[in-house]
Image: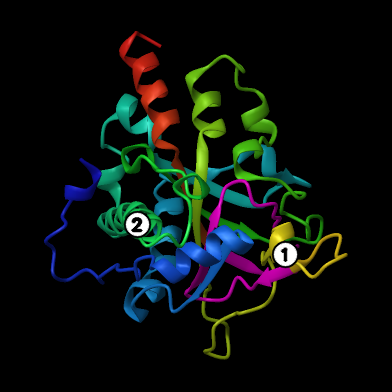
Amino acid sequence: MFDAVLSHDASLPQASIRSLTIADALQLTRQGYVARTKLFETSFADALPGEIDRLIEAGVIKPALDRVVGGQPTEWIASFGGIGQLRSGSARHEASPLIARLFTALQNVGYGYNLARERAARARKIASWMMPAIAVAGMELNVNRVVGTSDAVWSGLHLHTDMTRFNTSLRALDHASVAHAAVRARVFTVTGYARPIGADGSRLNDLGGALPMIVRPGARNPGDRAVFDIVPAYHNSGAFFFAGTVHGVGRMTIGGVRYSFQAFYPSAVGWDDINRRIAAGE
């Protein structure tokens, strides 16, 4: 399995993310997201850009064909886990022990989510339906690099929710397919960012690719029609949010580079249905 690949190599930077708490569960159910800074240990976050570049050079992470503008790629992306893990084995996973550690850390986030959900419900802080149980086995991880070019300073998506995040590639899916069902089953998302070092030796922490969120109606002031908040895509930062929270991706600056990942977790109910369909031969 992916989380076993060279997991005991002590020379690799450790990937660990602080687990969700009852307070996080309350914030998620109230406003739809929780922002995070210092997402990983510094050495791991610092290693991500170089590792993603290496995987692009090796052809493991490929240009997104629906993100080529003016003949230039603006995004390179690869997916790990999810239903693809059941079909394709671990050859891609074995290409990067560092991404393997990221995958394992994000699985642990999923277990922590379910635990925080149970504890918050037992403490009567939330109703269990407010945080759907997730299937960690169904987690899908996207790892990508996005760049801003003179022809494509806007490389993000319009406002969307993650279970309806159908770009050109996803819209091509058969609506009756298991792959389409897997996207629609998403209920929880974790995203994180890394930035390269600039010529002056500092991190390129511009606002390109930032994550604008629309705060849930119950968390707004009376009469507010919509309230935006911004999660900056700074180095070693990120957010936990419900897949149904409306959000977007801020425009990239010319010459800007953003490395990131998105982990999508399906509901436990949705994943059970997907597994039944796969077992039946789909």
Q: Nearer the viewer, residue 257 or 31?
A: 31
| Residue 47 place in picture, x, y as percent | 37, 71
Q: Residue at x 22, y 49 (%)?
A: 3
Q: Amino acid at mark 1?
A: Met
Question: Is 141 included in the stretch rendered in magenta?
Answer: no
State yes or no: discs 2 and 1 in contact (Cβ < 8 Å).
no
Distance between the Cα atoms at labels 2 and 1?
43 Å
Q: Residue furthest bottom?
A: 200
- Whether 165 is drawn above or below 190: the answer is above
The dot on residue 122 is: 2
Residue in the foreground of this view, choosing between 261 and 61: 261
Q: In the displayed structure, would residue 154 be above or below residue 206?
A: above
- Report the front residue among 137 and 76: 137
Q: Position of residue 221 (x, y in %)?
A: 79, 70
Q: Residue at x 40, y 53 (%)?
A: 55
Three-letter amino acid code at the position of disc 2: Arg
N-terminal-most mark, 2 or 1? 2
Quadrant for residue 279, please give it.
top left
**Side of 36 relative to 228 (left or right):** left
Task: State the residue position of label 1.
Answer: 252
Residue at point 52% right, 89% down? Answer: 201
Q: Is residue 111 left or right of residue 211?
A: left
| Magenta segment | 229-258
Q: Is residue 249 magenta?
A: yes
Does any portion of residue 194 appear in the rendered image? no
Residue depicted at 52% across the width and 80% down the height: 197
For residue 238, above or below residue 74? below
